[in-house]
Amino acid sequence: MIRVSASLLAILLLLASVAFAKDPVSLPRSATEDDPYLWLEDIGSAKATDFVKTANDRSWAQLGQLPKYQQIYQRLLAIYNDKARIPYVTQMGKFLYNFWKDEANPRGLWRRASWADYRQEKINWTTVLDLDELSKIEKENWVWKGASCLPPAYRRCLLSLSRGGGDAVVIREFDIEKKAFIADGFELPEAKGGLSWVDDNTVLAATDFGPGTMTDSGYARLVKTWHRGSPLSAATTLFAGQTSDVHVYGYKEFTPGHEHELVVRAMTFWTNEVFLHRQGQLTRLDKPDDADATVFGDWLLLSTRSSWTVGDRTFPAGALLAMPIDGHHVDNNLISIIFTPSPTTSLEATTHTRDQLLLTVLDNVKTRVFEVSLQHGTWQRREIPMPGLGTGSATPVDALASNQYFLSFQDFLTPSSLYLGGESPGALERLKSAPVQFVAKNLRVQQSYAKSRDGAMIPYFIVGNSDLRADGRNPTLLYGYGGFEVALTPTYSGGLGASWLEAGGTYVLANIRGGGEFGPSWHQAALKANRQRAYDDFAAVAEDLVARKVTTPRYLAIEGGSNGGLLVGAVLVQRPELFHAAVCQVPLLDMKRYNHLLAGASWMGEYGDPDEPQQWAYISKYSPYQNVKKGITYPKVLFLTSTRDDRVHPGHARKMYAKMKDLGADVLYYENTEGGHAGAANNAQQAKMWALTYAYLRHELMD
């Protein structure tokens, strides 16, 4: 089951086939003259490497030597390696599979257990693949990126392994019973490519097949059928997209009696076409280009991103609709409405068990989960009782064979719990509970609203001491994202609690526009030409915190990563007087160049095309790299990125740091040599990156 556009963000990261960049994109001389820091985009050059080493050494000298750094690092490492963590599992056949990293297994173990063992406090695991041992034998720094196993036997698997944690992966076929890679099995060389199963001897391949096979965004333009025993060069083309597309990919639904093979063509990040492949023919399914698509049995489920009129019926944006998958010519009489949004509710996710849909709905930024089934020709919905007001998610145990599902729940102050549902209506069996990782008895959570510049009310959560003083002196960390229809909901973070909240810090989570907290309209309100609204919203939350005397600019820091790093960069440049410190992680910052760097071109549906003068006119107003100026006092900034980030180019952070430093700003920079877009490849690296972050924040706001 694939939800096409809602999961497109993740899929794009798996199916891209651009090689890891080592050289900057060639530009006209004038562009080079306009950007004296362009050489920092040359990731592996000696000059750039020396620059990074010098910056890292400088930051380590300031932050790594702080007494609190080592204390935070050890606490975080213990949390990340805690053997009492919940081992989340996926059922394949009669076993439950889990991937696990700890102090003894820094790269990780892929392991399995029976249901009887999993229900025990001490689980008897059997190791299927030891990634540390494999890395030692093959002299590679392998990082686990997942496994796709062929049902119903689940014996043959396609394992994705990354060198150093980047999105580019090597894919190799693995025999799960023999616990060994299959000689002469399916294998793709390192690339941002993908394989998906059709049957024992056939896969669909979307990767770099050579010159002319890539889109302008750098992703696969072709889907090919590849048969066992033949070389990849002999694979036959099933579908060819356009070079102007973002990418294409193919997959098969394996539900018994409802098998379907499909191809998806993503024209932009937010638009796609879906084709049904049957008896050698491809049939395009009739749906709005901007609607997400999910296959459930013989139904095509559509999550609308804009209103859709069919005949005399109009379906609203944010609705979930069902129609027969064979209906390539839509009959509005065959369309059923499963979910309709309200001003405070939105559909966050859709998945399914064998016979039921599982809907995750946000209600004023808190989760509700529903079971939905087709009974006597109508879709019946029943709410699953949640343990509290927080964040829940439902995932099928074995979507092909049963109606069981895992339900996880957490909130800011409550560690995750894992439940088993679906056996009987309303019954949840608690399977596992995560350990308490920080003292929360004196903390409370409240939800507030700030009025943005255009009058929109922006919700945000405050997590802090129950006796929080309204004196403006509370050290406060404000976090946001505001993009790609991603919703930020209440989640438990042992690292945040142990490193920040326990020390007396206050944490604020801002639900700004651009995200998905209130459905497509909330996202589209800050799309492309309206991007500034996200930054106005973030600033409005900061202003509201000051007005309510929760904090003042002297005690206020901001944090964000990736698109959230762009948010941090834009707001600190536009409103430097509002903040004292900023943490900018794996960020986009040079919005003039972003679409020429790595996967950046695929995001033009979100930001716009800076090479088009009319679109650059609005992008240029907020692009941090172009707007930072001499003579302005900016908050102190810590930039964090990874050399192996092959999603958002590390040149963004490198260039912004260099420019601000040369302008006299107080900035720090740390670049991990591994880790990909996550910034860290193992628990020790993760602990180091976050220890640097919290040591910096506490030094700036609490000392």
Image (cartoon, rainbow, N blue to C red):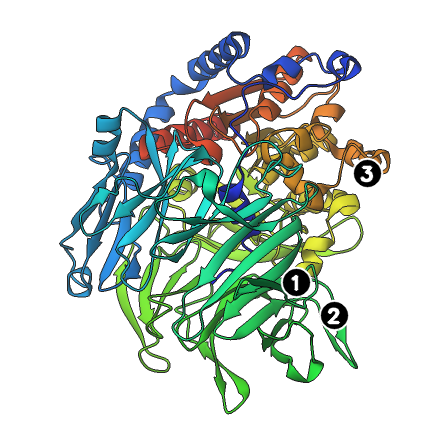
The first of marks 3 and 2 along the sequence is: 2
Q: Nearer the viewer, mark 3 or mark 2?
A: 2
Q: Amino acid at mark 1?
A: Ala
Q: Nearer the viewer, mark 1 or mark 3?
A: 1
Q: State left or right for residue 463 relative to residue 157.
A: right
Coordinates of residue 579 in the picture (x, y in percent): 64, 32
For mark 3, what is the residue?
Answer: 615
Q: State left or right for residue 200 relative to residue 542.
A: left
Specify whether residue 5 is in view: no
Q: Tell me whether the residue at label 1 lies in contact with that at label 2, contact meaning CB atoms closer than 8 angstroms.
A: yes
Coordinates of residue 398 in the picture (x, y in percent): 33, 67
* Most foreground residue, 93 or 509: 93
For mark 1, what is the residue?
Answer: 291
- Per the image, label 3 sits on a secondary structure element best described as helix
Write the residue at 54% across / 54% down: 7
For mark 2, what is the residue?
Answer: 308
Write the residue at 66% across / 62% down: 291
- Per the image, label 1 sits on a secondary structure element best described as loop
* Most foreground residue, 403 or 23: 23
Write the residue at 45% across / 36% down: 678
Mark 1–mark 2 Cα distance, whole angstroms, equals 9 Å
The first of marks 1 and 3 along the sequence is: 1
The first of marks 1 and 2 along the sequence is: 1
Q: Is residue 552 above or below residue 258?
A: above
Coordinates of residue 468 in the picture (x, y in percent): 51, 48
Specify whether residue 179 is in view: yes
